[in-house]
Image: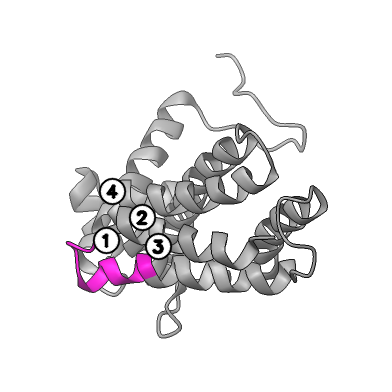
Amino acid sequence: MPARPRGADGARQPTVTERARRRQLVDVTTELVAAHGYAACSLQRIADAAGITKGAVIYHFASKNAVIRAAYDSVIDALTARVAEAVQTAPGPAAAVDAYVESMVGHMADHPTHVRVLAEALAPATDTGVDDAPASPTRQRALADLIAAAVAAGEYRADLDPATLAVIVHGAIDAVVAQTLTDPGYDLTAATASILDVLHRATAR
């Protein structure tokens, strides 16, 4: 029997079947957390939803928190990929800031289950093992760098503080997205337009 492939560190690489099962478990967990919350999302419930045994879940993820972390990482990866693509294809620095806002809120509008996974994973009252935070320096820095580039290009007024504006814009994004948790009919498209209007007024030369 041929040996299973190993990575550069010598660790065994998962098979195609194992990767597919892990993907299924991440998707199932995302849906369960969105529908029922972290507290109600047990390993047994994940197993039942996936149509496998609890032991089979543990084969892929050692604990409930490990599955939750994988679901959280999957949500973050999807969000950052969409935002990165939008920013990279923007025609200029100021347009890149607009694209950042539009793509971030747009992704959440298109994937409401992701909003709930993020809210549950980052809630201070739950011990999910996820140690990220909405106001993490890395997140703020990415937008601040885009704003700084728009200032340097002369597209924004020169006296702006990119770091502070990034905090303000992220606060607005988080607020409108959080609104959908209690008001599913909340119009994120209109909310995005309002955030951009405020941004354009604040940055006008």
Residue carrying label 3: 194
- The number of numbered discs placed on residues in the rendered structure image is 4
Going from the N terminus, do you reach mark 1 or mark 3 first?
1
Q: Give the overall secondary structure of the magenta segment.
A: helix
Q: Residue furthest top?
A: 1
First reached walking from the N terminus: tag 4 or tag 2: 4
SS at mark 4 in the image: helix
Which residue shows up at 56% across the image and 59% down it?
200
Q: Which residue is denoted by mark 4 in the rendering?
A: 28
Residue at numbered disc 2? 114
Hey, which residue is sitting farthest bottom in the picture? Answer: 125
Q: Which residues are magenta?
A: 176-186
Please state which of the two labelled residues, at mark 1 or mark 3, is closer to the viewer: 3
Judge from the rendering whether residue 199 lies leftward or rightward of residue 91; answer left or right: left
What is the C-alpha distance between the residues marked 1 and 3? Answer: 27 Å
Q: CB of mark 1 within 8 Å of CB of mark 2?
A: yes
Q: Nearer the viewer, mark 1 or mark 2?
A: 2
The alpha-carbon separation of the residues under discs 4 and 2 comes to 12 Å
Q: What kind of residue is marked 1?
A: Ala
Percent across and percent down for residue 73 are 51, 53
Which sits earlier in the primary sequence, circle 3 or circle 4? 4
Q: Residue at x 61, y 51 (%)?
A: 97
Give the Cα distance between marks 3 and 2: 23 Å
Q: Toward the viewer: 110 or 51?
A: 110
